[in-house]
Amino acid sequence: MPQVARLLDHLDGDVLLVGDLAYMNGLLDEFRRCFDPDFGRFGARLRPAPGNHDYGRPDADGYFTYFGERAGPGRRGYYAFTAGEWQVLMLNSSVPIGRHSEQYAWVQQQLQQAPARCTLAAVHHPFDSSGTSGANPWLRDVWELLHAQGADIVVSGHDHLYERFAPQDASQRPDPARGVRQFIAGTGGAPLYPRSRSAINSEIVIQAHGVLRLKLDPASYEWTFLDVNGTALDLGMGTCH
């Protein structure tokens, strides 16, 4: 969406992409025609995670061919990097991610062997949502792992809206001291979804195209959701565990 891309022209830092980046089937031609004209210019700033539409073909060849090394090693679709003093995990919810999967074991290894004061995970499907897609309970294992290891933020897409949750555990109990805060930012250009339910621990839902800006400080974070006019519709701050 050109208006969203123009917002990014005025924001620095990494650009986290939480999937469904080329409609409808994630073909290489769709990436070249639909994604590249607006977002290709951000180049090395892009940090993608794949969505279900990027797996319109079983091997997501268009996605992995387009992003190349930026999509992580081995065409797995999950990888890690550091942003300042933050550990960032880019996950792939379109391949096995449950307790006995290779991806789960990798997440566990990253959290235990390379611990950081502050941790963010990005994954396409949200653990819960007030949008039409609702909850995805099959993500509970990895959410439980993130919570147990002290992760701070999960950023998701999938539902075409913006939503912010209070910190919670894997049983969706409020946990202001150690809970993981989820943001949904499926607001990059596809038609918006209505609010269809009230998810547990949801704090705000906004139907607008825009960008979630996260300022990651050494022991805290600030969030601002900006619409395509640059107006801040939601903002706040939190402290790392």
Image (cartoon, rainbow, N blue to C red):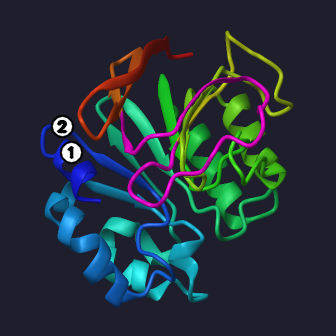
155 over 180 or under it: above or below: below
| Kind of element beneath mark 1 | helix
Closest to the observer: 222 or 224? 224
Would you say 217 lies left or right of 50 here? left
Amino acid type assigned to the residue bearing label 2 in the image = Leu
Mark-to-mark CA distance, 1 and 2: 5 Å
Tell me where residue 1 appears, x and y as whole percent: 29, 59
Q: Which residue is mark 2?
A: 11
Tell me where residue 38 appears, x and y as whole percent: 21, 64
Amino acid type assigned to the residue bearing label 1 in the image = Leu
Closest to the observer: 203 or 154? 203
184 over 213 or under it: above or below: below
* Overall secondary structure of the magenta section: loop
Give the residue at x 74% y 15%: 175
Tell me where residue 188 appears, x and y as whole percent: 39, 53
Callout 2: 10 Å neighbours few (<14), some, many (20+)?
few
Give the residue at x 72% y 44%: 127
| Kind of element beneath mark 2 | loop
Verify whether residue 201 appears in magenta: yes
Would you say 231 lies left or right of 90 here? left
As drawn, the label of residue 23 is: none
Quadrant of the image containing the C terminus = top right
Closest to the observer: 229 or 85? 229
Give the residue at x 68% y 11%: 176
92 over 215 or under it: above or below: below
Q: Which residue is mark 1?
A: 8
Magenta residues, start to end = 185-212
